[in-house]
Image (cartoon, rainbow, N blue to C red):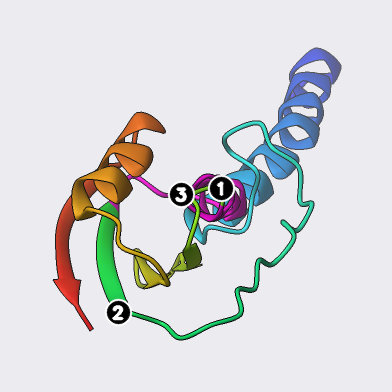
Amino acid sequence: MNGQTLLIVVILIIILIPAIVSTLKHMKGEGDCCGGSKEKPVKKKIDGSKLRELVVHIDGMHCQNCKNRIEKHLDELDGVVAKVNLNKKQAVVSIYREIDDSVIRDVIEGLDFTVVSMEQK
């Protein structure tokens, strides 16, 4: 192996190691693949009695930012508190006032995720 070939191999290794580490984090759902930060959303709490809980199975979530986006947008709905589990690919939505399930579906799908199913908990 001559000097130029060795230099090329070293440069490729230097470039590939961070790329592989980033890819592994992404595949585990730990990276910020969607351009977001690791900032935690503010947890919403509602006083009063819960009317019902809905489990929403979601496809297309890849990272913490995906989780945070869904929680943030669902929590913006009046009378709704959401907790998203990235590993289970689902959101548990606590509902404190009458709201149609289609509103929840529209919010999630409006963020370019797919609602696979919805069921009462």
- Which residue is painted at 48% across and 62% down in the image? 79
Q: Position of residue 23 (x, y in %)?
A: 57, 45
Give the amino acid type for the residue marked by disc 1 in the picture: Glu
Question: Magenta part mainly helix, strand or loop?
Answer: helix
Residue numbers of the magenta segment: 59-75
Q: Which label number is shown at residue 62?
A: 3
Q: CA distance from mark 2 to mark 1?
A: 18 Å
Label 1 crowd bin: few (<14), some (14–19), many (20+), radius 10 Å = few
**Labels 2 & 1 near each other (Cβ < 8 A):** no
Of labels 2 and 1, earlier in sequence is 2
Of labels 3 and 1, earlier in sequence is 3
Give the amino acid type for the residue marked by disc 3 in the picture: His
Q: Say whether residue 52 is left or right of residue 64.
A: left
Between 61 and 28, the one lying in front of the other is 61
Of labels 3 and 2, earlier in sequence is 2
**Magenta stretch encompasses residue 38:** no
- Which residue is painted at 76% across and 19% down in the image? 8
Q: CA distance from mark 3 to mark 1?
A: 22 Å
What residue is shown with label 1? 76
Label 3 crowd bin: few (<14), some (14–19), many (20+), radius 10 Å = many
Looking at the rendering, in which quadrant would you find the C terminus? bottom left
Give the amino acid type for the residue marked by disc 2 in the picture: Arg
For numbered disc 2, what is the local secondary structure? strand
For numbered disc 1, what is the local secondary structure? loop
Q: Say whether residue 80 is left or right of residue 13.
A: left
70 vs 89: above or below: above
- Which residue is painted at 51% across and 61% down in the image? 28
The image quadrant of residue 3 is: top right
What residue is shown with label 2? 52
